[in-house]
């Protein structure tokens, strides 16, 4: 069944990160450790922001949403690797595969938009500090965050509609560790030209370049404002306020560029899996570490909660 052309598939077989038997246990342990660190780190940030009054500010409101997105995206993309090792069942239904692609893509798009909103927040804080409390009040922040989530979950719908119309697949074996768009397109023997055109036009312009431009543009003004500060201490302090966010942005977009904008000659499914693994596992794991190690407010909040626990 797996190797012949089909008019319909009821399920797919997820090949996973590697099909070498000796590597299954090491891969399982590595993914499990990464997932636990990701979940624990982002949950710590999430709880600190919710429980500590000192972190009830716009920047940390966005950071709370980022933690939710990182936990969700890593769970959606990595859970099959863990479940397959424990259950020895690497099958996923056609509906389940489509749903996994949809949810993961929505979360990824929402995260890119959220980083753009966080970039705007840093722009207002540095370039217009006197109006910060007005421009970035709780209502405006809630609207921005809601817009990021809503747009992210709406703009992927055309992909799912087109993908659901595919009626023929060369094989039902997906050479990936979750249901991603590229391996599904390469498996299909239906006409994929419309979906590929949508991926190029909307995916490149609307889903990638637009959030990138909205994220980078405020930093042009931020850098300009920082350079106008006379004292080196003032410049350092201003840069420090946006260094964590900038680090996360650079890390994410460099990974996405390596994954999707490489030369065609270097574009193989196996290499895609490696970049995708870093993007879906390592980046969400590093985000809370970056924000905690480079942020005095988060470190102080963690120490305060730790002292409360010790004295109870």
Image (cartoon, grey):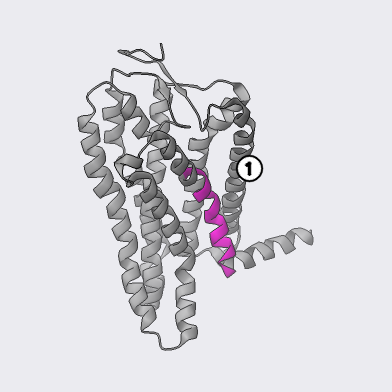
Q: Residue at x 48, y 26 (%)?
A: 15
Give residue 105's position: percent from left, percent from top.
38, 40
**How far across and how far down the image is residue 67, in percent?**
51, 51
Image vertical order of residue 192 relative to residue 202, above or below: above
Answer yes or no: is residue 128 visible: no
Q: Quadrant of residue 193?
A: top left
Compared with 192, 258 (above or below) is below
User: Which residues fall within the magenta stretch?
Assistant: 280-296
Give how far across and how far down residue 224 sits, in percent: 33, 77
- 192 in relation to 168, above or below: below
Secondary structure beneath dot 1 equals helix
Asked whether residue 295 is drawn in magenta, I would say yes
Image x and y of residue 266, in percent: 35, 41
The residue to which callout 1 is attached is 33
Q: Between residues 113 and 243, which one lies in front from this camera angle?
A: 243
Quadrant (top left, top right, bottom left, bottom right) of the N terminus: top left
How many marks the image carries: the answer is 1
Give the side of residue 89 with respect to residue 101, left or right. Answer: right
Q: Is residue 104 magenta?
A: no
Is residue 284 in view from this perspective?
yes
The main secondary structure of the magenta stretch is: helix
* Quadrant that contains the C terminus: bottom right
Q: Mark 1 Cα within 10 Å, few/some/many (few <14, many 20+)?
A: few
């Amino acid at each position: 069944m797996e190797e012949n052309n089909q008019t319909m598939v009821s399920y797919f077989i997820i090949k996973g990160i590697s099909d070498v038997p000796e590597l299954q246990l090491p891969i399982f342990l590595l993914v499990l450790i990464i997932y636990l660190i990701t979940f624990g780190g982002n949950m710590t940030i999430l709880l600190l922001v919710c429980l500590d009054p000192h972190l009830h500010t716009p920047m940390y409101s966005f950071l709370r949403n980022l933690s939710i997105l990182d936990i969700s995206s890593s769970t959606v993309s990595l859970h099959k690797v863990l479940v397959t090792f424990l259950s020895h069942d690497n099958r996923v239904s056609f509906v389940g595969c489509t749903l996994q692609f949809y949810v993961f893509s929505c979360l990824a798009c929402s995260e890119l938009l959220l980083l753009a909103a966080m970039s705007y927040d840093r722009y207002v804080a540095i370039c217009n500090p006197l109006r910060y409390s007005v421009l970035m009040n709780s209502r405006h922040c809630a609207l921005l965050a809601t817009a990021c989530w809503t747009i992210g979950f709406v703009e992927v719908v055309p992909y799912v509609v087109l993908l659901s119309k595919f009626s023929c697949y060369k094989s039902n074996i997906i050479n990936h560790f979750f249901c991603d768009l590229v391996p599904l397109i390469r498996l299909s023997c239906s006409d994929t030209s419309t979906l590929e055109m949508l991926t190029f036009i909307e995916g490149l312009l609307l889903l990638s370049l637009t959030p990138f431009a909205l994220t980078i543009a405020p930093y042009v003004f931020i850098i300009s404002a920082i350079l106008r500060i006379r004292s080196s201490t003032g410049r350092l302090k201003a840069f420090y306020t946006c260094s964590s966010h900038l680090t996360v942005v650079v890390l994410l977009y460099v990974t996405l560029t390596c994954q999707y904008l490489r030369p065609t000659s270097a574009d193989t499914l196996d290499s895609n899996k490696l970049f995708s693994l870093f993007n879906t596992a390592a980046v969400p794991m590093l985000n809370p570490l970056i924000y905690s190690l480079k942020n005095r407010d988060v470190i102080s909040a963690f120490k305060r909660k730790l002292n409360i626990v010790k004295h109870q």
